Image (tube, grey):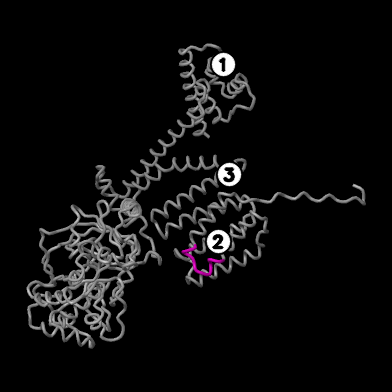
Amino acid sequence: MTPGSARPAPKASPRFHLDIPLGLVVGLAILAHLTHMPVWAIPLVIAGLLWRFFHEWRGWPRPPQFLLIALGFMAGLGVFLSYHSLWGRDAGTALLTLAALLKLLETRAPRDQNALLLLGFFLITSLLLFDQGMATTLFSLMLFAGLITAWIGTSNPSLTAIKPRIRAAGGLMLAGLPIAIMLFVLFPRPPGALWGAQQPTLQQAKTGLSDSLTAGEFEQLATDDTPAFRVSFQGSVIPPSARYWRVLVMSQEINGTWHAKIPPNFDAITAPDLFPTLNNEVTYTITLEPSERRWMPSLAVPIALPPNTVLSDTASLFSSRPLTDRTRYTVTSATRYRLDPNHLSRAERIENLALPNDDPKLKHLAQQWQGLPALEIRDRILSYFHTEGFSYTLRPGKLTGENRMDAFLFQTKKGYCEHYASAFTLLMRAAGVPARIVTGYQGGEEIADYLLVRQADAHAWSEIWVEGQGWIQVDPTTAVAPERIDTGFANAATQDPTLPNSLRGNAGFAGQWAQLNDRLENGWNQYILGYSGSTQIDFLQNLGLKNLNLGAQLVLSLIATLLTWAGVFLIWRKLSQATHPMPPAEKAWQPIERALQRLNVPRQAGETLAAYIERAATAFPAHRTQLMQAHTLFSQWFFAEHFGKKSQALAKIKAKNLARQLHWLYWRKKLTR
């Protein structure tokens, strides 16, 4: 180069491109976590994903390193300030998601892609910490398949076509499926459901019922078609008129709001004085959606309780801990019973006769019935509701100010179940009969062999105390809308325009699709999420494997898994051989060549069979004769026009014997080294 000539420009290195399946899967996994992250992180996540997209599509520059470092510190500080910790499910997942976003923005080399790939697996797994429903699981499996596809591409840079990568990923997942099933079925699991460590989220903690009740409150649930629980009966399904699912009992009324009696967690609880009619027992299993509450719906009054539960003095079923995950429990209830028939304590009598200071017209109406038998008073109040122009509606309007029940009884005369239960209970008290409100659910839609009870089935009714008979159930809604009990609340409010189509009992395609979807969800809840330690023990006992301790069960699961893995391997090998068939002579020769390769005598590229055998005989003179005999036989098999079946059988036997001797030689060298 002369002094005045121009220096050639350095050749620009090609711009690194992120693997498309990897970027797509990690981006979708990050977006799936947006609902679990603090609000301030959402615009940061969206902006980061868009930046990386435009970097790949339009060639935008990557964010500078100092900006990524600053964002990392700010993200950690923001997570700490939002959750007051960097540990735990919510804080840890938010931190992981933001770290994956920053790594996605930083990725500029194959090594970065490998780190991003590993982060992707953690991101997908953490989705199941929030929800294990069928839809979320299928979405996670789809993302997992995408990551396997990306992994195949990043480990084989020459394989750029997507279809072969997808086929390979699908084959790997299918091969691993039997092993996963075997581990799921047999591997020892702790008591509780599959995801017993699940914590609640705002989306899951939706109970529909609270421990207080104000007239007009159930209107909010009337159009809520989300499931509350599902019920499977041992035997035939009970009729609609008997489907009263007891949850809470409310005796105290303060300023128009009724309050429930919640037993404490650890204090001793006085059991109710219960006399069940044992020939009217019903056994059923409830799958309850997460509620973050302790109360558990039950039919009538329970007489055989599930583990870790208590029966309150008002015959309501409570868990010993908040129900933060989906819960399955089996109960036996008596549909005919007497509850506290012989005695009502003075404190209970005072509490269940207490009246508010307002509603003078209600009290005046009840005075005409004072002194009559309790059951006659009940009948007169129900007749009053039936004959005085009352109607059942989902939108009765709010009762405000004082004398709310007076306004309902003598002015609007339009109400939902809690209006009638409140008015009936106060009228019974004003007439001198102890009464209280019960809240829970009534009804349920029959789907296949189980009942689906929705939040819209929330209901309120009353109980009155009668000497010698105890607490008697009374549903005043039946006096106004008996179809609410017999055919469901949707039929009682079918003219209401706000009622969703999903609650109208539509028998068309939409209704059938909704039922099919719920059947799938119910099966998933029962057989996958509900596969607990006790269910596993029952399954093993059905197979004849009784009284297995933890160690024996662990050994059994490992042996079964290894056998399954061996079966998958053999099937995979057979399929590979069928796809790429090997000539019989080559197939018979392979054991010898593999044995020599293990002894550090591999065949060189372009090396003839004669030269290879001579080199092997020099390395192992004790086996020269066998090697030469094998060479003679296989040379004829490879190159002769006709090689008879007897000669082929002799060559196979020679090859097996020689390969066996070489394997023994390999292990002797190993042991004497």
Magenta extent: 34-43
Residue located beneath label 3 in the image: 155
Residue located beneath label 1 in the image: 635
How far apart are labels 1 and 3 at the CA level?
A: 39 Å
Mark 1 vs mark 3: give the one in front.
3
Disc 1: CA contacts within 10 A as few (<14), some (14-19) or many (>=20) = some
Marks 2 and 3, the one that precedes in the sequence = 2
How far apart are labels 2 and 3 at the CA level?
A: 23 Å
Check disc 1 and give the amino acid type. Answer: Ser
Check disc 3 and give the amino acid type. Answer: Ser
Disc 2: CA contacts within 10 A as few (<14), some (14-19) or many (>=20) = some
Image location of residue 152, percent across then percent down: 55, 44
Q: Secondary structure at mark 3?
A: helix
On screen, residue 595 versus residue 391, left or right, reads: right
Residue occupying the point 26% across, 77% down: 259
Residue occupying the point 52% across, 59% down: 30
Magenta stretch: helix, strand or loop mostly: helix
Residue located beneath label 2 in the image: 99
Per the image, is 628 magenta? no
Q: Nearer the viewer, residue 576 or 143?
A: 143
Q: Are marks 2 and 3 in contact (CB under 8 Å)?
A: no
Q: Is residue 369 shown above or below 268? A: below
